Amino acid sequence: MARGGASIQQVAYDLGYESVPSFVTMFRKALGTSPGRYMAERHAGANPKDSNG
């Protein structure tokens, strides 16, 4: 995710989670949204700033 498009599964395993659902549960508790929605919102918010370069 934060590493240039890594999958949620890869991020979960990199952080030591043995299951993706456990990672998603932790993520939702910590940030109040799912990893996919979080990244979609970040991506949508980043485009206007990035295009002005």
Image (cartoon, grey):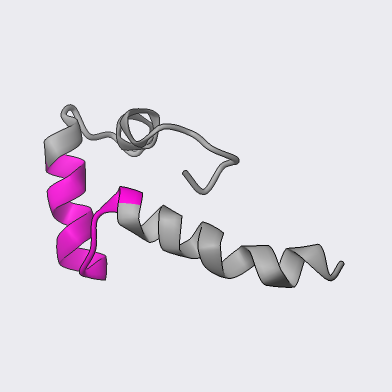
Q: Which portion, as a residue range, is magenta?
A: 22-36
Magenta run includes residue 52: no
Above-or-below relation of 52 to 16:
below
x, y (%) of residue 39? 43, 54
Measuring from the top left, give residue 22's x and y in whole percent.
12, 41
Q: Nearer the viewer, residue 15 or 34?
A: 34
Query: What residue lies at 32% left-to-right and 56% top-to-bottom?
Result: 37
The number of callouts visible is 0
Does 20 sit above or below residue 50?
above
Specify whether 38 is left or right of 21.
Answer: right
Name the residue at 34% across, 39% down. Answer: 15
x, y (%) of residue 36? 33, 48
The residue located at (66%, 63%) in the rendering is: 47
Quadrant showing the C terminus = bottom right
Is residue 33 found inside the magenta-colored segment of the image?
Answer: yes
Q: Nearer the viewer, residue 33 or 25?
A: 33
Residue at 31% over, 51% down: 35
**Relative to 6, residue 46 above or below:** below
Quarter of the view holding residue 33: bottom left
Vertical comparison of 8 with 50: above or below? above
Which SS type dominates the magenta stretch?
helix
- Residue 8, given in percent of the width and then of the height, sits at 34, 36
**Residue 53 falls left or right of residue 34:** right
As drawn, the residue found furthest toward the right would be: 53
